[in-house]
Amino acid sequence: GNPRLEPLERQAHKSREFLVNGERWTGGGWRTVASIVYCLAQFLVAVPDAVLGPTLTALGHQVSCAEEGEICPAMLEAIGWNRTGAAVSVILAWILSQCINGHYVLAMGFSMVSASFLVAPFSTTPYMVHVSFFFIGLGKGLASLNSTALMVALRQGNPKKLSKWVNLLSIFWGLGSIFTPLLVSLTTLKDFRLSFFTVAVLTFSHA
């Protein structure tokens, strides 16, 4: 062949491969799809907290610790257990990230939230509510932390795009906080359990 053309023929092509939490992905389109999935995860992370508060009175009445329309102390303790679960998730997320792919931890978190939202409406004692709320906080924390970590791992090669997508994570979380009160108002009018089942389905769809 012509030696003058050889350098042109050997021009390197841009690689479309990239690593996400140890997995090899190909194609720029998949990068965008993955980013949107992580944003939707943040949207769903905002949903549980907005549902739990307005349904505390109904839960308290169900487990016979308060009259209808009142909030009993045991239900306020349940919120404390929920926050404890979220705090524990920070340590657990770090431990799991050392040995398990982040996508599995994300799925694990949403599975915990979904299962807990299915159990809570059938609780017969305050202690069952406490356990459900703890695992809701734990699962929500795992999902939130890992969706952010996965986004950073996916976009770390481009600081500009990383900044844009991390901002979008916050925006989607805010949209979830805005949307959920509407969901609660529409579903709780019939039965508070409908709010819990709706959240269970939404979070399981992302697991």
Image (spheres, grey):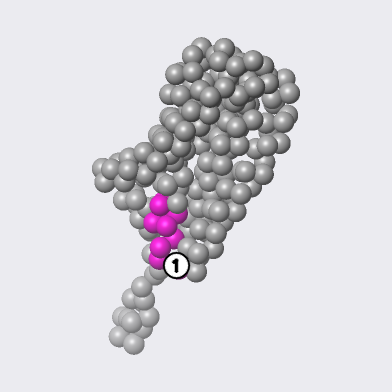
Viewer-proximal residue among 62 and 69: 69
Please give the residue where the numbered disc 1 appears in the rendered image: 158
| Coordinates of residue 105 in the picture (x, y in percent) | 37, 39
Q: Residue furthest front?
A: 73
Residue 68 falls left or right of residue 64 = right
| Coordinates of residue 177 in the picture (x, y in percent) | 62, 43
Viewer-proximal residue among 155 and 73: 73
- Asked if residue 148 lies in the magenta stretch, the reply is no
As drawn, 4 above or below 49: below
- Asked if residue 155 lies in the magenta stretch, the reply is yes
Viewer-proximal residue among 171 and 151: 171
Q: Residue at x 33, y 40 (%)?
A: 92
| Coordinates of residue 163 in the picture (x, y in percent) | 50, 64
Q: Main secondary structure of the magenta part?
A: helix
As drawn, 153 above or below 136: below
Quadrant of the image occupied by residue 192: top right
| Magenta-colored span | 149-159
Asked whether residue 35 appears in the rendered view, the answer is yes
As drawn, 94 above or below 205: below
Q: Residue at x 37, y 44 (%)?
A: 90
Q: Secondary structure at mark 1?
A: loop
| Coordinates of residue 172 in the picture (x, y in percent) | 59, 49
Q: Residue at x 41, y 35 (%)?
A: 85
Asked whether residue 197 appears in the rendered view, the answer is no
Viewer-proximal residue among 17 and 182: 182
- At label 1, the amino acid type is Asn
Q: Residue at x 73, y 23 (%)?
A: 189
Q: Work out which quarter of the rendered image holds the N terminus and state it.
A: bottom left
